Image (cartoon, coloured by chain):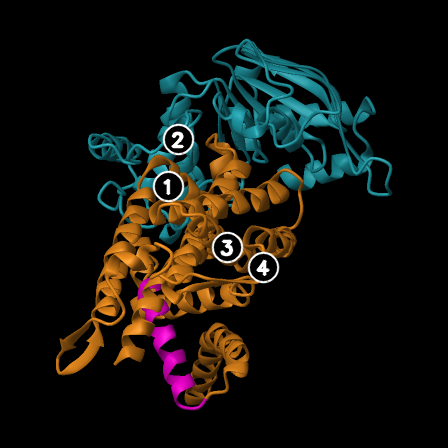
Chain colours: A orange, B cyan
Amino acid sequence: MILLLGSLTMGLILSLLAFGVLVTFRVLAFRDLTVDGSVALGGAVAAALLVRGTHPLVATAGAFVAGALAGTVTGVLHTRCKINGLLAGILVMTALYSVNLHVLSKSNVPLDPEAIPTLMSYAGSASQMTDLFGWEVPTRELIVLVAAAIGVAMVGFALHCFFQTQWGLALRATGDNDQVIRALGADVGWMQTGGLALSNGLIALGGGLVVQYQGFADVQMGIGMVVWGLASVIIGDSLVGTKQLGWLLCGAVMGSVLFRLMVALALRGGLNPNDLKLVTATFVFVALVLPDVWKWWMSRRAVRNVA
Amino acid sequence: MLELKNAYKTFYAGTANEVRALRGVDLRIAEGEFVIVIGTNGSGKSTLLNAVAGTFYLDDGEISLAEHDVTAWPEHRRAQLIGRVFQNPFHGTAPSLTILENLVLALRRGQSRGLGWAIPKDARDQLRERVRLMGLNLEDRLDTPIGSLSGGQRQSLTLLMATLVQPKLLLLDEHTAALDPKSADQVIRLTERVIKQDRLTTMMVTHSMQQAAHLGDRLVMMSGGQVVCDIRGDEKKHLRPEDLLARFEEIRRSDLLDESAAEMLAEMYV
């Protein structure tokens, strides 16, 4: 039961990561690889601020700002210095590894909510237990789960509203057909940069929350996160089965939670943790290729039936 | 209104593929003038339009538009003054956005975009009326993604988007060339109506002899990156497709147009 609660909460927190990936991959049609760096950056900045006694809310906001800056750098590299989008992301991601080490001062920083005030500290002590349909679960886990659900719902709704604003609509048009938006008087470069800032801000916010939830920040925590986010978005897409942005946002949350649960179950069932990234990557590969293979197979069958 | 002074543009300069697309173009267009631009492939007519729109910067020369020196303005800034319809019907609209969303995007052409709602309360009815006036029967499908419409419908909507906020200059780049004859005819009739109604200063590139002869109040012919022929006033008014062919012949003889280009013209227009 604790395993279930834990993966639900983690899945919810990581849906911020999925939102970020959704903004770049789906809305902007930009393949941003800054993600791995900005997750860890968000975690590092939040941890460094918390250790210095900053208010947890400020530290969490700091993670967002740091991520937005990282996204801006990727955007400027791509749009002003004309570097290929994939490469711009890789450059920033690589550079961020050193930045994160400096921010953290060492490769791993513990964040014990009993010793350092974090958002977790608001949820009470770890020893209190509550009865949940006959299971004894820590009250804190339950509170955090509910808080995460509310938080993610609020961020998702805010994003949904943002995409209905003039700026948000222009951002969607940029990913759809940049020639249109240029002819209608918007600077595509700044649109993309703004979108990258928003995306990486959300991703780093996710990182900042993850470190508080798991109780430590690690400089390696970002590795493979872009694939993780992508997996969530892909699962979400197939769950909601529409291209409407509001539904895609819901799908991203469902995808993130579901994926986290699947991973937890697989690990429980004896999957070697070392194989996790390989399995994740394979999963995304299959999810990307399967629809095409399916279509090919169906069309072949149709041809055969005619014959 | 629009003035190009000594405009030069060379693509792939210094390579085997060097194209001297504009070679000293001087052109003045008065307010309210409807100019047809014709010429063979590679004559520089589309380049001329793109130079005005700001798709690229000139190598040399100046462009001024509505009392602004726009030579160094980037494309998106010139969009404050210019409405455009492209040859490819897919270029002018954002396919996964709805008709209404595309239109409200166009409503803010040349203005800053902030965090206000993209679709103001009264915009829907207002835009529905504008769409109804186009006579496309799309006014009840405002929430349909534009990508599901036909090329002709999309091109008509692009025209509406380009003129929704009245532009100082309307650029039409062979905007009916990719359409079937019936849709092309419909888009041309719409174009005529919109231009007349709002007295829009317009440059229209076309490959159709019919359009070249019957539309507009001035005709400019490009060849080899230069303006080689400029017909206006009464002469343009009484111009027939046959006259235009005679003109081509005349220009060919005066050696401004080489043999192969003349052949191409004949193939294309006859």
Q: CA distance from mark 3 to mark 4?
A: 10 Å
Q: Residue at x 60, y 22 (%)?
A: B73
For mark 2, what is the residue?
A: B113
Most common SS among magenta residues: helix
Q: Nearer the viewer, residue A123 or A307?
A: A123
Q: CA distance from mark 2 to mark 4?
A: 43 Å
- Which subunit holds the residue at mark 1? A
- Ranked by sequence position, the earlier of labels 4 and 1 is 4
Q: What is the span of residues highlighted in magenta in the rendered image?
A: A252-270
Q: CA distance from mark 4 to mark 1?
A: 42 Å
Density class for disc 1 (Cα within 10 Å; few <14, some 14-19, many ≥20) is many
Asked if labels 3 and 4 share a chain, the reply is: yes
- Which subunit holds the residue at mark 3? A
Q: Quadrant of the N terminus of chain A?
A: bottom left
Q: Nearer the viewer, mark 3 or mark 4?
A: 4
Q: Amino acid at mark 2?
A: Arg
Residue A26 visible within the image: no
The disc at residue B84 is none
Assign a secondary structure to mark 2.
Answer: loop
B28 relative position to B147: left or right:
right
Q: Quadrant of residue A101?
A: bottom right
Q: Nearer the viewer, mark 3 or mark 1?
A: 3
Q: Nearer the viewer, mark 2 or mark 4?
A: 4
Labelled pair 1, 2 in contact (Cβ < 8 Å): yes
Assign a secondary structure to mark 3.
Answer: helix
- Ranked by sequence position, the earlier of labels 3 and 1 is 3
For mark 1, what is the residue?
A: A169
The disc at residue A106 is 4
Q: Quadrant of residue A246?
A: bottom left
For mark 3, what is the residue?
A: A44
